[in-house]
Amino acid sequence: MALDTWLIYLLAVAGLTLTPGPNSLLALTHGALYGHRRTCLTIAGSCSGFMLIVALSLLGIGALLQTSGNILLIMKWLGAAYLIYLGIQVWRSPAMSMSQPAEPKRRSNLALFRSGFTTSVSNPKVILFFAAFFPQFIDPERSLLTQFVVMALTIGVMEIIIEFTLARAAFQLRPVLERSGKIFNRCCGGMFAGIGVALPFSN
């Protein structure tokens, strides 16, 4: 993967991980309920499930690319359409709203890990997103394995950083996201739509 492509990919991944969703909401909520140290277990489970889906998505894309050289072009255009659709959905989505019990129940370490893992793997939209997202950045002339490793590591590290930051700053971020979340959603939605429009036309 060329450096300029990776930088665009990094920006897109940052937008993906910052967009309010089940994983970020769970990290934020558990950070407020249990503290950021114990929420590391939730994040570990979440990222384990997340990376499993990333690996399955990349393996599926790699298998398709072996069958036909034109499949990448088709996947790019279908993926671009889905990213535009997703951008519109994120743009129109309401601000994040959370409620928490006054006395949170004590949960085991395994329960925290399991809740993070289940949240990641039980979201079918994530698989659709990655199937649309990854082909936009793949160069068929370069090593697929190297590109897949770089893409997976980038998104994994970014996900850990963002979720830990949310857990650490849970009490400070909750009112901000509830008050200004609509504007934030529109920024992320506009970025996804912009990627969907621009990337199919790039080399």
Image (spheres, grey):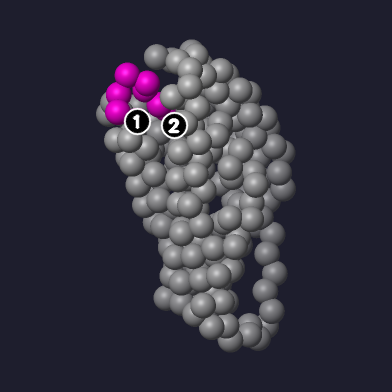
Q: Quadrant of residue 142?
A: top left
Is residue 139 shown in magenta? yes
Q: CA distance from mark 1 to mark 2?
A: 7 Å
Q: Quadrant of the N terminus?
A: top left
Q: Secondary structure at mark 1?
A: helix
Q: Which residue position is annotated with label 1?
A: 144
Task: Say what secondary structure mark 2 lies in.
Answer: helix
Residue 194, percent across and down?
55, 25
Q: Is residue 173 visible?
A: no
Q: Earlier in the sequence, mark 1 or mark 2?
A: 2
Quarter that holds the C terminus: top left
At which x and y percent is residue 160?
A: 41, 57
Residue 106 location, x and y as percent? Answer: 58, 86
**Image position of 69 with respect to 161: above or below:** above
Main secondary structure found in the magenta portion: loop
Residue 199 located within the stretch drawn in magenta: no
Q: Toward which corner of the image does residue 37 lie, by quadrant?
A: bottom left
Where does the magenta region start and end? 136-144
Instruction: Find residue 99 and report its horizontal and vertical position in percent.
Output: 70, 69
Q: Which residue is mark 2?
A: 62
Q: Is residue 148 visible?
A: yes
Q: Residue furthest front?
A: 67
What residue lies at 32% left-to-right and 19% top-to-bottom? Answer: 141
- Amino acid type at circle 2 is Gly
Give the residue at x 30% y 28%: 143
Q: Is residue 197 above or below residue 97?
A: above
Q: Do the CB atoms of the residues marked 1 and 2 lie less than 8 Å apart? A: yes
Mark 2 nearby-residue class (10 Å; few <14, some 14–19, many ≥20): some
